[in-house]
Image (spheres, rainbow, N blue to C red):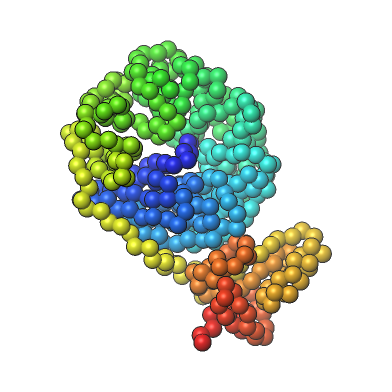
Amino acid sequence: MVILALMILCHSVSGQFCVIDSTLYTIDPADFTLHRRILPSSVIDISVDANAFVLTDRYLYKVEYPNLTVQDRILLPQRFNHVITNEQYIILIGTNEVILVDKINLAFRSGIGIEQGDYIPIAAFTQRGMSSKHNLFLVANSGERSTIKVFDLKTGTLDKRLNTDRVLFAEFQPHTSTFMLLDRKNTITVYDMNLKPLRRINVPPDPLFFALHENGYVVYCRHGVFLVNSSGSIIDFQPLPLTDHDVSQASMYLAGNGITVLDLYTVRPKAFRTTDKTFTHLYDLNDTRECFGLLLDENSSPFLFNAETMSIQAISKISMVAQVPPRTPKTGHQDSLWYFQLGAFINHDNALDSYAAFKSENLPVFIDTSDMYRIKLGGFHDKETAMSALELTDLTGWFILQRKIQQYGATTFFLGGQLFTMKDGIIERSTP
């Protein structure tokens, strides 16, 4: 998995879309309409399965594609560096904790404290058997070394760890239950799920990333693209000056005054197209035929590049997705409400101090003692209404969907300058 500062390229079943800074792009494969949506802040990371889960510094978005409709979102209490998904959860990875979020309604499920580090996800994998395990594989980089850590998402425990040379790129293969690490010593090592090394392959110097090939590996280095067999011998080489920006580019490159298309089977140039226009960026927008790219010129005007015909055309069908609030999905149960968790404590005295501080601000918080001492505000029938008010405050926490907690009495209070009323444990916005 490779994360770039300005561009993240994500594969999907129906095609691909790319993210450039804070703008999401897709091309509808039916009529090649370019859909574009601008988010309030830059995208940090993205994970795609049936939907795209888009991480920014303040929000996690659930986005439908190719139309880029925001189906749901959730306010984040802090910055996270990566997002990855498995069958059940959206998994947010920070420097000292992992957070599990429900894929259906984006509600907080649980958190795992981890040792401070610069973590990059490799895979979130389910091991099936007598007792299924949901494992999260992370790489923690420190100087010239890396540590592979495997966490059990059910128990929150660290199952395994392995120290190795600094990892440059990681690739997970679910059909073989293996993952491959490219390290700074120009070696690809294949591991099983128990961190047992299965084989090692030496590759050319200065590698950026690699892709699987039926005869071995296509290795992308700073000075070219190599075809390497499973024994590490170089079969073929194509000189192409590559940079970190090209890491997710597989077959299309801006080269001087033109565009080079690479045949990934032979690692040979398939075609070259000269241009009289200056293009600054080229991003793969491949459908199943892997032949389309998105070109941007100096003015960020979009053009469609067809690698089969080597044609370039201005994209006239551009659909700018309206910036309207998402429709938050309804709660799963009639007796479930949204609660905003402001803190969780093991120590009872610390919880009481936090509780008193929030009560002094006239907030109707309570302490939920179902496991830890959790300071909560709620409940809300509508998460979006609560979030639109809370994002105007300096309060930080997690939205949790749970069965209604009985509270008695009535009170009024302000959130984000808006007046709310709580009666018998249900909070509603007051109308003037």
Which is more toward the observer, 188 or 402?
Answer: 188
In the image, is 99 to the left or to the right of 13?
A: right
Which is more toward the observer, 127 or 288?
Answer: 288
Rendered position, 329 above or below 303: below
Which is more toward the observer, 47 or 245?
Answer: 245
Residue 343 in view, yes or no: yes
Residue at image coords 57%, 76%: 417
Q: Position of residue 316 (x, y in %)?
A: 20, 51
Q: Position of residue 293 (x, y in %)?
A: 28, 39
Q: Position of residue 336 (x, y in %)?
A: 55, 72
Which is more toward the observer, 5 or 10?
Answer: 5
Q: Position of residue 11 (x, y in %)?
A: 37, 42
Rendered position, 378 above or below 236: below
Residue at image coords 60%, 61%: 398
Total labels: the figure holds: 0
Residue 338 in view, yes or no: no
In the image, is 399 to the left or to the right of 206?
A: right
Residue at image coords 54%, 83%: 430
Rendered position, 375 above or below 180: below
In the image, is 198 to the left or to the right of 152?
A: left
Residue at image coords 74%, 70%: 357
In the image, is 239 to the left or to the right of 134?
A: left
